[in-house]
Image (cartoon, grey):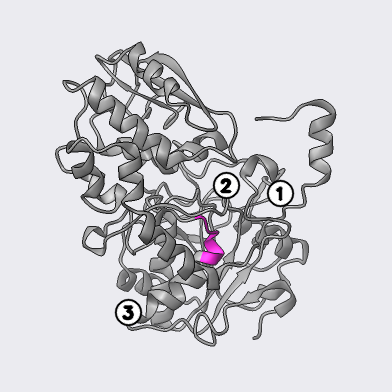
Amino acid sequence: MSLNRRGFLTAGAVAATATTLTGSAQAQEAQHRRVTPGADLLAAQGWRTLAGRKLGVLSNPTGVISGQVHVVDSLVAAGVRPVAAFGPEHGFRGSAQAGGSEGDYTDPRTGIPVYDAYGADATKVAGMFTKAGIDTVVFDIADVGARFYTYIWSMYTAMVAAAKVGAAFVVLDRPNPVGGRAYGPMLDPAFASGVGRKPIVQQHGMTVGELARFFAAEFLPAEGVRLDKLDVVEVRGWRRDTVFHRTGLDWTPPSPNMPTPDTAAVYPGTCLFEGTVLSEGRGTTRPFEVIGAPGMDWRWRDELTALGLPGVRFRENYFVPTFGKFVGKTCGGVQLTVTDPESFQAIRTAVSMIVTARRLYPDVFAWRPDNFIDKLSGSARLRTMVDAGAGVDEIIGAWRDELAGFDRKRRGYLIYR
């Protein structure tokens, strides 16, 4: 069955055939919001372009229609019943913490079997697809725009698995909440891991649909497979310069420690603190916006404020994590507040925070002993340059050429202008 081309962008030659507004200003802004995710567009058509297919849906709580009804529930209600669902990190219904999943089970709401795909390689996922008897994989998960957020790699694995079993792949696209600008260092393939499998930059600036096009053409051939059918159901009304607070969409937390779009704004940078002994704010109400450790104090806030970094304000902050690092201990540090999402630079800000923290608190700051920072940043370069006393501009400049190269390469796969 051929999918309706009016509702889809077919990968064709690519894949193989292939701060808050108020009052009248808020009302005026809302008039210009016309952002509609791909799932909403198909749901409005009664999912007819997917009718008759044996669907396997890879999704989580962000796969919702109008911010309310899950895509699987909507499909079932429309009489287009998937034969299986697949859960990534945190699970299909999103109940698991970081590094966890929900296991295999039968979804009590729909009676559909759910397979745990988190951490599974392409061969194992292909076996799940075969067991479930699917002929089309539907991907609907909201990304946050960072290489180390694992959902894009779940999508990549599923794409390889779909190619292995000859299944079609459909991406229900959603906006990138931090916009369409690429930034940061490239992953060195020698440092590939579950938080970065292929060479893309740290803040990739692409939607999952655009990434799927890129993956299909740039990476799948090296896996020895070809995805014969890739379709992207485009977002309507999204532009590359549109960050989440201008979309008019409701925010659904894509994972337990991504509670708000404010979290997503800082995450491509401050997630680097997971590679240090400092708390990245897990176990607080503002993960990734609150950073610190016992022994840190007001001096960090003063130093960071003096830098005049664009689009961000720092507040001296003290907190006691309820889980994660330093449980039950008082930590000093800062809270970031993004004042202008368009000018804010998450990665430059985080590098500035790391450089100043190491200089001010040499007896507190340290990398995690397993050098997890290398996997997060994509190589040993950030760690070794910081340890050698390099400045922020020198560190940022070290990846300028590779960023420019990635930006050029991705242009042919971009959908939104």
Specify the quadrant that holds the N terminus: bottom right
Q: Residues within 10 Å of mark 3 (few under 14, many from 20)?
A: few
Which numbered disc, 1 or 3, marks the residue that appears first in the sequence?
A: 1
- Residue 222: image tag: 3
Quarter residue 50 falls in = bottom right
* Residue 139 in sight here: no
Q: Choose mark 1 or mark 3, whichever is in front.
A: 3
**What residue does disc 2 label?**
177
Q: Position of residue 123 (x, y in %)?
A: 31, 73
Residue 329 in percent (x, y) is at 27, 14
Q: Which residues are magenta?
A: 205-210
Residue 41: percent from left, percent from top = 73, 62
Q: Residue at x 60, y 70 (%)?
A: 232
Q: Return the residue at label 1.
A: 66
Mark 1 or 2, nearer chain start: 1
* Residue placed most toward the observer, 282 or 15: 15
Amino acid type, residue under disc 2 in the picture: Pro
* 209 displayed left or right of 272: right
Query: In this rendering, would 384 be left or right of 8?
Result: left
